């Protein structure tokens, strides 16, 4: 795995846009030296413009500001939004800009799905929350339910080194990896950028990423290791759920050995095919003792989990083929009883107040055979989808500067 466990961190759970945006915007606006930001979605709406103003204040103070957006998730930022940032010296880049065929975007695979912010190398934010108004309650019934974390401590150095390495993609590989190794070496030694020794009492945490090169399965392996070691409770809330065979097997085995395994999945979906695929797994899981709940108050966008009140994760990675096998993702994994218990309590609040437990009816023999056949076909199609997709032509994504076209 590409993760390095680091003690001495302070980690704060942030829920939805109301908890996340004020903290991250204030941190960016107060930046003195550097802002590194990566996001899947940035829209020109109320939230996007608030982020724009925070970035402008940081750049106006002389901070070096880098923003990376995904070309599929953020395809149409207008000049009225981007030009003020460019004029202020903000470096805007797009990951694999959208390609269109007869007006339709076609390059939807292997997206940059991370949501990261690092400010002055001292504070970082990691989670699943994008920069759009649909993460605020005022958006109405379709406002998303999601989480992020704010991090202070030596783990920030790892996240900063990771973001800087992505900036240096155009540099020679040897130079890029040498700089990344040196930064990681200092952070793993428990030092900040000034060489001061880090405290070793705080939260122990790891920054875990997934890419299409040497870290293809790291996030999934952390999940699997936690589930296999569970003694009492596994609690997962995830927006898109169709994991690989091994994680499904680990969840079933945990339930069968007496671990309480609870899954909170979404009922309101923006991609109905994803929900239909998830539902094909319900009977398979429930018959093994896994309890499945559907959250229906608002769209669930969460990617969080807690195991035995000592292991927890928050990040951008869903448990489906695109996140586990194709997209670029980032999670924080935490080993801390206080943080894990707090996250569990927040998820349980959703489960108890806003969820319906799924009951699988017993069908007749003919329908049962059809369901089994359909589930088998869809399961294996989804299971091998990521392998097929890796051989598609767009295997070398581009990162390009965002510029305003001259009229």
Image (spheres, rainbow, N blue to C red):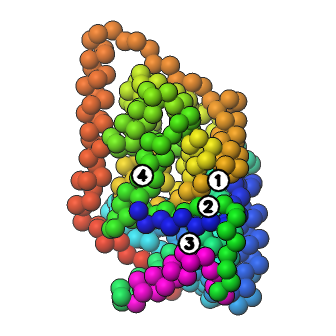
Residue that label 1 marks: 336
Q: Position of residue 388 (x, y in %)?
A: 23, 53
Instruction: Read off the magenta span.
Output: 175-194
- How far separated are the C-alphas under marks 3 and 4? 19 Å
Q: CB atoms at circles 1 and 2 under 8 Å apart?
A: yes
Of tags 1 and 4, which is closer to the observer?
A: 1
Of tags 3 and 2, which is closer to the observer?
A: 2
- How far separated are the C-alphas under marks 4 and 2? 19 Å
The tag earlier along the polypeptide, 1 or 2, is: 2
The tag earlier along the polypeptide, 1 or 3, is: 3
Q: Residues within 10 Å of mark 3 (few under 14, many from 20)?
A: many
Q: Position of residue 295 (x, y in %)?
A: 60, 34
Query: Where residue 204 is drawn, which disc sits there?
Result: 2
Q: Residue at x 56, y 34 (%)?
A: 232
- Of 285 and 5, nearer the camera is 5
- How far separated are the C-alphas under marks 1 and 2? 6 Å
Which SS type dominates the magenta stretch?
A: helix
Residue that label 4 marks: 220
Question: In the structure shown, which secondary structural element does the residue marked by tag 3 occupy?
Answer: helix
Query: Where residue 346 is drawn, which disc sits there?
Result: none
Question: In the structure shown, which secondary structural element does the residue marked by tag 2 occupy?
Answer: strand
Q: Position of residue 34 (x, y in %)?
A: 65, 83
Q: Position of residue 129 (x, y in %)?
A: 61, 57
Does residue 105 appear anywhere in the picture?
no
Q: Residues within 10 Å of mark 2 (few under 14, many from 20)?
A: some
The tag earlier along the polypeptide, 3 or 2, is: 3
- Of 328 and 83, nearer the camera is 328
Q: Residue at x 41, y 52 (%)?
A: 221
Q: Residues within 10 Å of mark 4 (few under 14, many from 20)?
A: many
């Amino acid at each position: 795995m590409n993760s390095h466990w680091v003690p001495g961190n302070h980690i704060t759970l942030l829920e939805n846009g109301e908890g996340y945006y004020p903290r991250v915007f204030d941190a960016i606006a107060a930046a003195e030296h550097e802002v590194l930001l990566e996001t899947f979605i940035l829209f020109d709406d109320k939230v996007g413009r608030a982020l724009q103003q925070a970035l402008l204040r940081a750049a106006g103070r002389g901070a070096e500001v880098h923003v990376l957006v995904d070309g599929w998730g953020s395809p149409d930022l207008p000049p009225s939004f981007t030009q003020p940032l460019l004029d202020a010296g903000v470096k805007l880049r797009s990951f694999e800009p959208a390609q269109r065929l007869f007006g339709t975007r076609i390059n939807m695979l292997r997206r940059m799905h991370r949501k990261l912010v690092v400010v002055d190398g001292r504070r970082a934010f990691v989670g699943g929350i994008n920069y759009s108004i649909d993460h605020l309650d005022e958006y109405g019934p379709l406002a998303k339910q999601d989480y992020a974390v704010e991090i202070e401590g030596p783990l920030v150095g790892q996240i900063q080194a990771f973001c800087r390495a992505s900036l240096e993609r155009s540099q020679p590989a040897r130079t890029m990896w040498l700089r990344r190794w040196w930064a990681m070496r200092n952070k793993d030694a428990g030092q900040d950028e000034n060489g001061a020794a880090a405290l070793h009492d705080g939260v122990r945490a790891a920054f875990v990423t997934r890419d299409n090169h040497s870290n293809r399965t790291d996030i999934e392996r952390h999940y699997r290791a936690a589930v296999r070691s569970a003694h009492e409770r596994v609690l997962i809330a995830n927006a898109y759920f169709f994991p690989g065979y091994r994680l499904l097997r680990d969840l079933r085995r945990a339930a069968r050995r007496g671990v309480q395994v609870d899954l909170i999945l979404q009922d309101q979906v923006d991609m109905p095919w994803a929900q239909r695929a998830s539902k094909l797994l319900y009977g398979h899981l429930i018959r093994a003792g896994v309890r499945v709940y559907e959250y229906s108050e608002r769209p669930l966008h969460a990617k969080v989990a807690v195991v035995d009140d000592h292991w927890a994760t928050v990040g951008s990675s869903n448990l489906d083929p695109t996140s586990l096998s194709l997209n670029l993702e980032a999670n924080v994994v935490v080993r801390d009883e206080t943080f894990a218990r707090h996250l569990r309590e927040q998820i349980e609040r959703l489960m108890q107040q806003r969820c319906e437990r799924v009951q699988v009816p017993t069908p007749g023999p003919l329908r049962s055979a059809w369901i089994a056949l359909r589930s088998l076909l869809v399961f294996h199609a989804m299971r091998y989808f990521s392998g097929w997709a890796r051989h598609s032509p767009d295997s070398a994504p581009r990162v390009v500067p965002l510029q305003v076209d001259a009229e």
